[in-house]
Image: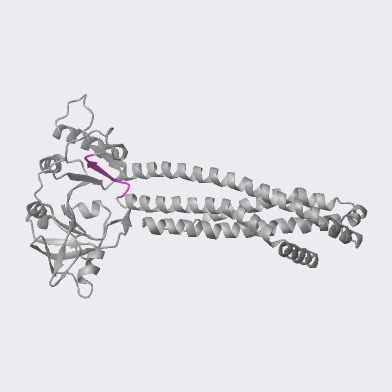
Amino acid sequence: MFSLVRENIRIAFDSIRSQLLRTILTILIIAIGITALVGILSAVSALENTISSDFSSMGANTFNLQRYDFTSQRRSNDEQKVNPVINYRQVKEFEEEYNFPFTNVSLSFQGTNSAEVKYENEKTDPEVQVFGVNENFISNSGLEVDAGRALNYFDVENSNSVCVIGSDLKKALLDDVNPINKTISIRGAKFKVIGVLKEKGSTFGNNQDLRVLMPLQKARTIFTNANINYSLSVKTDKKDMLEGAQDEAIVLFRNIRGLNPIEENNFGIERSDDLINRIGEITGVLSMAAWIISVITIFGSTIALFNMMLVSVSERTREIGVRKALGAKSGTIAFQFFIETIIIGQFGGILGILLGILLGYGFAYLAEFNFVIPWAAMIWASIITFIVAVVSGSYPAIKAAKLDPVESLRYE
């Protein structure tokens, strides 16, 4: 039995080599469909994995109050409702009056995203982000301190000249020394480094590790723009209290913004799990598009493989007649052609998977996403190529098996 299978596989490879150009073209047609499926799904997975990990780092028990919500930010400028900035007075009033149990309130603003940071005779390019924050910002944002300590209540209240830096800034300026207690300079002001954040990576080209966090009041003395927009983040220690904490925060902030009961919110509120769900909806649509494109292409691959095998049966009619005359059974002939179809389909599938992974990796690399191996897409691609081979090879194999040996020997 095994010797017969081995012999059929050998004959199948000999046949493939004898019609190499036709086989290569068929393999490429199959590979194109599989490449589209694996490539698009791996790119979608990289996008979803990167954004989801960024938002989920906030924690499922955290929500933000900001100038616009996620939906408003995606609208065109003509449609977007212009909300007033969230100013310092409003965030401080919220911090003082918000007393929902088991919650921590974080205040922050971005002073600049193009600061030049100096240490002794070294300096960075003007691309460092500087944030003014309170003591709860690091924990509410899902950040962790890798060395030293975080900002505390006394640093913020006393407006101490201290800071916590990102891992890339540490590598750029203080890679050869222990950064703790070293002094850096930003816009002429000196700050003692008290901590280094764990690496977070980049999203859409935004390097989250090239930044400086300093006490809120100290940052306000350096960055004095009148229209600075502040952000609020609330984290609850108990997840089941999140809804109540959010409702109370909305009521309080509406009062602070001076809204009457019939006015819409002129600010946005976002939870990390809401954003992740929306991202899931978007990537779901992209995945569906990938399947539609792939199915259309794979349907063409099925027709191409089917046609190739029919032509192969016609061209090898005399060979089939000789084999039958020598005692080959109809099942053996059918199995030979069926194995040939399976081999061509799997070659196309393997090539398509490799090209799809390269396509997805290239997209993730260029967009600075976290690439993940698309195991599910690879498994589906293998299953699809097998089904394509079965569907395409069944009829030609049956047709070859049913050929009359006498008529086949007469065929020229």
Residue at position x 15%, y 32% in the image: 255
Q: Please tell me which residue lies in front, 392 or 196.
A: 392
Left or right, 107 with respect to 199, comes to left
Q: Quadrant of residue 354?
A: bottom right
Whole-percent x, y for residue 322 in the image = 88, 61
Residue 369 appears in the rendering: no
Residue 246 appears in the rendering: yes
Residue at position x 37%, y 50% in the image: 52
Residue at position x 28%, y 54% in the image: 142
Left or right, 174 with respect to 14, comes to left
Q: Quadrant of residue 371?
A: bottom left
Instruction: Tell me if residue 30 comes above or below residue 194 in the rendering.
Output: above
Question: Would you say residue 315 sits in the magenta stretch?
Answer: no
Instruction: Tell me if residue 15 comes above or below residue 77 in the rendering.
Output: below
Question: Would you say residue 66 sits in the magenta stretch?
Answer: yes
Whole-percent x, y for residue 212 in the image = 18, 59
Q: Residue furthest bottom?
A: 176
Magenta part of the chain: 59-67
Q: Residue furthest front?
A: 412
Assign the C terminus to one quadrant of the image: bottom right
Whole-percent x, y for residue 194 in the image = 16, 65
